[in-house]
Image (cartoon, coloured by chain):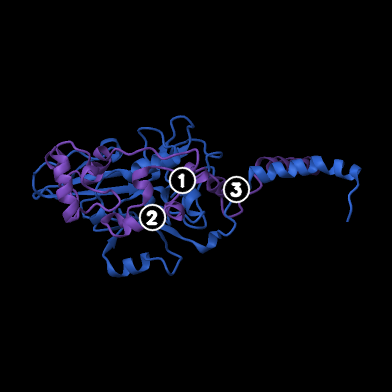
Amino acid sequence: MSISRRQMLLLLPAAAVAWKHVLAGTPEASPNYKLSDHWWGMLIDITKCIGCGNCVRACQTENDVPDGYFRTWVERYHVSDYDIENPHVDSPDGGKKGFLPSKEEGGKNFFVPKLCNHCSDSPCTQVCPVGATFISPDGVVLVDQKYCLGCRYCVQACPYGCRFIHPQKNVAEKCTLCYHRITKGLTTACCENCPTGARQLADLKNPNDPIHEFLKTHSVQVLKPYMATHSKTFYNGLDGSVR
Amino acid sequence: MAAVFVVGILVFLGVRASLVPRSFGQYGHYRGDAITEIAARPVNFAGHQACEDCHADVLEKKKSGKHVNVNCEACHGPLAKHVDDPGSVQPAKLDTAVLCVRCHEANLAKPKGFPQVASADHSSGLPCDTCHQPHSPAIVAEEKSEAKAGGKK
C-alpha cells in the first residue's frame, strides 16, 4: 500500500485528532468490572481499633469531604460499671485528630468507627422522591448528585446519621464505599489507611473473600438490627451499649 | 375531541422522552449513568501494591517487623500523583515525633495488647526514629546500646 503526498496531507489532521485522544487517555473506566459479580460490605473489628483517626483523614482527602462533615468518623465509648444503658460517647472533630487520653474511671472504654452501613433494605433510598439515591446492583448505596434536589428526606431517614447535605453543592452526600476505588480493584481509602486492619472491605459474593471464614468463626453483629435494614457493615466485638 | 386527546398524549410522550435521561431505569428507578460517573472519579491513594512495585527494598525491611501490615500511605499520605509521575512529585519528609504518637500514644480506650507509650515520659521529646526504625520498629540489642550512647550526648 502506498500513500501519495496529497493523501498523506489529508490524513494528517485526522491523525492529529486521533493522537489527541490517545494522549488524553480513555476515561478511567473499569472494563473488567461486572456489577453483578459483587456485593460489597465492610467488616469492622472493634477489638483492633486504636482511634488514631487515620480512616477519617484518609476519607476526607480521598473524597474532598468538607471540613466539619464526615462520611466516616470514630466514636469513643465510655461505659461505666453501674449505668451500662447510658454510655458516654465523644467524637471530637470526628476523631480526625485522634483522642485525648481517657479518664481513669473504671468501666469499659473502646472506639467505634462508623460509616454508611450500605443496608440491603436501606430506608434512605426508599424515601427519595426523585430517584437520586439508590442501591447499585453491587450493593453500594450511592447518590446521583446531578439528580438530587437537596430535599433532606434521606438525611432524616437514615437511622445511623450517615448522610449530610453538602454545604456548597446543597445535595445529599454520603460514603460511597470509595466506589471509584473498589471498581478499579483497590480497597477503600479508610481500609487502605487503617494501620491495624480494624476495617476490611468485604465482597460477599466472592467465595474466596476472608469475610466468610470470619463470619463463621466470630460473633458478629450489625448496628440497630431491630431496624431491619439488613446492614452490610459488620462489627466484631460490638458492645451492647453502642447505638 | 379525540384529536385533542391524541395530540395531548403525543405532546406528553414527547416531553417525557426529552426530560427523562436515557439511562433512567437501566438498573432501577435511577439514572444508570450515575454509577459510571461516580466510578470515574480520580484516585488519591494509590494503594500499597503500586508502592511495592518499585520499593521492594522497603517491603523486605517491613517483612521482618511489626509494621508489616501497615500500608505505606497510612504514614506517607496520599501519593497517587507520585505513582503517576515519580520524578517530579516527591513524598514529603515525615516527622516521627508527630506521626508515631498518632497511633502509639497511650489511651485507656485502645486495645490492651497494642503497644502504647506516654510519649512525654518515654522519649522526652526526642523524635522516635532516634532509636526506632519506622519500617521495622523493634530495637535489636546492639542498636539499643548505640542509640543510648547517641541519645544521651
- The residue located at (47%, 38%) in the rendering is B89
Within 10 Å of disc 1 (Cα), the crowding (few <14, some 14-19, many 20+) is some
Q: Which residue is mark 1?
A: A127
Q: Which residue is mark 2?
A: B57
Q: Quadrant of residue A214?
A: bottom left
**On the picture, is A236 further left or further right than B92?**
left
Chain A shade in the render: blue
Q: Which chain is purple?
A: B
Asked if the residue under mark 3 is in contact with the one under mark 1, i.e. CB atoms within 8 Å, the reply is: no
Q: Earlier in the sequence, mark 3 or mark 2?
A: 3
**On the picture, is B13 further left or further right than A239?**
right
Q: Quadrant of residue B106?
A: top left
Instruction: Tell me which amino acid carries mark 3.
Output: Asp
Asked if the residue under mark 1 is in contact with the one under mark 2, i.e. CB atoms within 8 Å, the reply is: no
In front of the other: A135 or B92: B92
Whether residue A28 is visible, yes or no, is: yes
Chain letter belonging to callout 2:
B
Residue B127: horizontal and vertical position, in percent? 22, 39
Q: Which residue is mark 3?
A: B33
Instruction: Tell me which amino acid carries mark 1.
Output: Val
**On the picture, is A104 further left or further right than B104?**
left
Residue A56: horizontal and vertical position, in percent? 34, 42
Name the mark nearer the viewer: 1 or 3.
3
